[in-house]
Image (cartoon, rainbow, N blue to C red):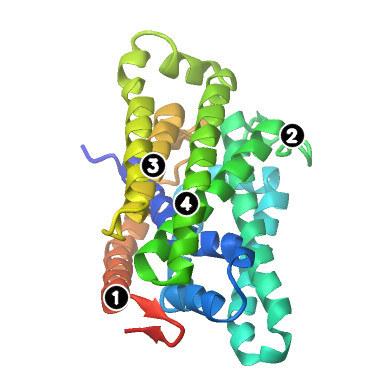
Amino acid sequence: MIDLTLIWAGIIAFAVGAYVVMDGFDLGIGILFPAFRVGGERDMAMNSIAPVWDGNETWLVLGGGGLLAAFPLAYAIVLPALYAPLTAMLLGLVFRGVAFEFRWRDPGHRAFWDAAFCGGSALATFAQGITLGALLQGIEVSGRAYAGGWWDWLTPFSLLTGVSLMIGYALLGAGWLIWKTHGAIQTDARRFARPLLIALIVAIGLVSAYTPFLENKYYQRWIEWPGLVLTAPVPLLVAATGLLLWRSIDDPRDHRPFWLTLALFGLSMMGLAISIYPDVIPGRVSIWEAAAPERSQIFMLVGAAVLVPVILGYTIWAYWVFRGKVDEAGYH
């Protein structure tokens, strides 16, 4: 028998993963933006993401809309628990988008728009990391409603995940620039990548060490037998991937740092999935408890079966068209 709830959980997980992969590098470029020289370097960094940055955010809409439609109980609990960081994230994304467009159309105030682009990117990333940390540490639920306070999301752990995601996105942005640019900005990106990689490995280690003590279920899956058999390879794979990434930074095959950074993100998301499955609100609500009625899931699945391939198709096409290197004038 087909489990529609599992299918919808997979669709939403895919959408969130696609968003992290695709919007992560352009948010990372925004975080790194003040480190680039005013003029040609900043223009080249912006041109490298200009054809794809707004389309990347489609996946965030799909993930959020899918959560509302397929798991309405989870949406009703998560939203009031995380109003502040989610609002900050949306404001950051809006401000970044406005700054992206206006820096070209209002050259007289370009310094302001550059600062807005960086600030919006950093705010959105930090808020996303805090949201992840707040979900992992648990949301207080009473019956079918949020029962916590306004500031429950603000903890040392959520701040740690916020900073960690900023480091990860910055490394992803550096990898993208290594792949897509040349000259001085590529040299700068290679120079930034090594300390960012060290910082990210440390951040992953700290989050991984902290997480098992947030919920008893996390501890059982990561520390106790037999869960340890399944989870032990994950940190080993992270270490091996980090070593390969370190060696690839000066590799003439410019694409390798970006894809190996994506592999680190993939392993981190795998660890997250191992920790929380099958809950949508860890330790409180499972995906089956939060799911919409079966008829609703079937109705929405028909639409998703059409829309997701269309979104994938135009996304792949856009990246294929703009697959070359970029300079101050654009792709060539």
Q: What distance separates the C-alpha of mark 3 from that of mark 1? A: 24 Å
Q: What distance separates the C-alpha of mark 4 from that of mark 2? A: 40 Å
Q: What distance separates the C-alpha of mark 3 from that of mark 4? A: 14 Å
Residue 246 x, y percent position in the rendering: 38, 43
For residue 43, side relative to residue 134 (left or right): left
Q: Earlier in the sequence, mark 3 or mark 4?
A: 4
Secondary structure of the residue carrying numbered label 3: helix
Q: What residue did someone put label 4 on?
A: 193
Secondary structure of the residue carrying numbered label 2: loop
Q: Earlier in the sequence, mark 3 or mark 1?
A: 3
Work out whether 9 lies above or below 251: above
Q: What residue did someone put label 1 on?
A: 324
Q: Nearer the viewer, residue 77 or 96?
A: 96
Q: Earlier in the sequence, mark 4 or mark 2?
A: 2
Residue 279 x, y percent position in the rendering: 47, 32
Looking at the rendered structure, the kind of residue marked 1 is: Gly
Residue 181 x, y percent position in the rendering: 39, 71
Q: What distance separates the C-alpha of mark 2 from that of mark 1? A: 50 Å
Residue 262 x, y percent position in the rendering: 37, 49
Image quadrant in which you'd find residue 233: top left
Q: Nearer the viewer, mark 2 or mark 3?
A: 3
Q: Residue shown at 62%/77% (left/top)?
A: 38
Q: Nearer the viewer, residue 34 or 276?
A: 34
Looking at the rendered structure, the kind of residue marked 4 is: Ala
> Disc number at residue 148?
2
Looking at the rendered structure, the kind of residue marked 3 is: Leu
